[in-house]
Image (cartoon, rainbow, N blue to C red):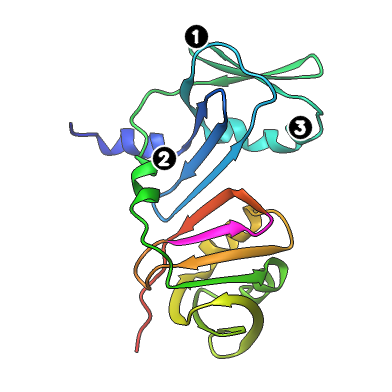
Amino acid sequence: SAVAPEERTAVLECVLIELAADEVTFVATDRYRLAMRTVQPVEFSGAPARLLVPAAESSGLSRWVAAGEVVRLETRPGGAAIVRDGETHELTAVSGDYPAYGVILDGLTPPECRVVVNRTALRSALEGREVVAFDVEPGHLRLDGEVKLDVIGSGSTRIGFTASLLAAALDASVGPDVLLEICAPDRPVVVRSADQGTFTTLVMPVRLGG
């Protein structure tokens, strides 16, 4: 079925929350990158649920949620509520067809290059750049032929990124290191927190000239 452009845009401004007994999944995308995180609930009751929440409503809750020992997420007619220490934040649900992120993940081919790099060092190297070229070789990664960073992993490749998109993926990651899984220069690159595999971001590369 056809989807109006304004409806598609509204959906992309939302966070998808999938609730199930074994895990809770959060997904966000803007066409150029896709971020997903799964967490295991300490308890679950009721039926599995799926809802879209405007990102603007949820973006300011991360620190508030992190400050609590136990947080409860309750689905309600027309939305949901996050409860912590007796305080409640209401979330409004939005109707719409969210991109089939599972199909995207399942369609990724095995990586030809897989390396772990220090997240802070890579983030700093992206400062002041617009499009950046990565040359990955055994033991190191060069950015624009200038900055050289140590890496651990396998494979060699050359690939380009919009620096701001990759920087945002690094900012959202946790831990000191990130894992980069590169399938091909024109395919989404998987960025994972090296010590927290439940947080994954896909970043689209860009074509390099020359």
Say whether disc 3 or disc 1 marks the residue closer to the N-terminus.
Answer: 3
Examine the image and state in which quarter residue 98 appears: top left
Residue 193 part of the magenta segment: yes
- Label 2 SS: helix
Left or right: residue 109 versus residue 133 is left
Q: Position of residue 121 (x, y in %)?
A: 70, 73
Asked if residue 20 is among those painted magenta in the image, a careful observer would answer no
For residue 120, which quarter of the picture?
bottom right
- Of helix, strand and loop, which mostly describes the magenta segment? strand
Q: Earlier in the sequence, mark 2 or mark 3?
A: 2
**Residue to which mark 2 is pinned:** 12
Q: CA distance from mark 2 to mark 3?
A: 24 Å
Residue lying furthest left? 1
Type of amino acid at the residue the image marks with label 3:
Trp
145 up-or-down from 78: above or below: below
Question: Which residue is at the front of the view, 194 or 147?
Answer: 194
Tell me which label, 2 or 1, sits earlier in the chain. 2
**Residue at the (40%, 68%) spot, across then down:** 183
Pointer 1: what residue?
77
The label on residue 64 is: 3
Label 1's element? loop
Q: Amino acid at mark 1?
A: Pro
Residue under the point 47% across and 71% down: 161
Range drawn in magenta? 189-195
Residue 91 in percent (x, y) is at: 58, 21
Looking at the rendered structure, the kind of residue marked 2 is Leu
Split into 4 quadrants, where in the image is the C terminus?
bottom left
Seen from the viewer's position, the closer of residues 5 and 175 is: 175
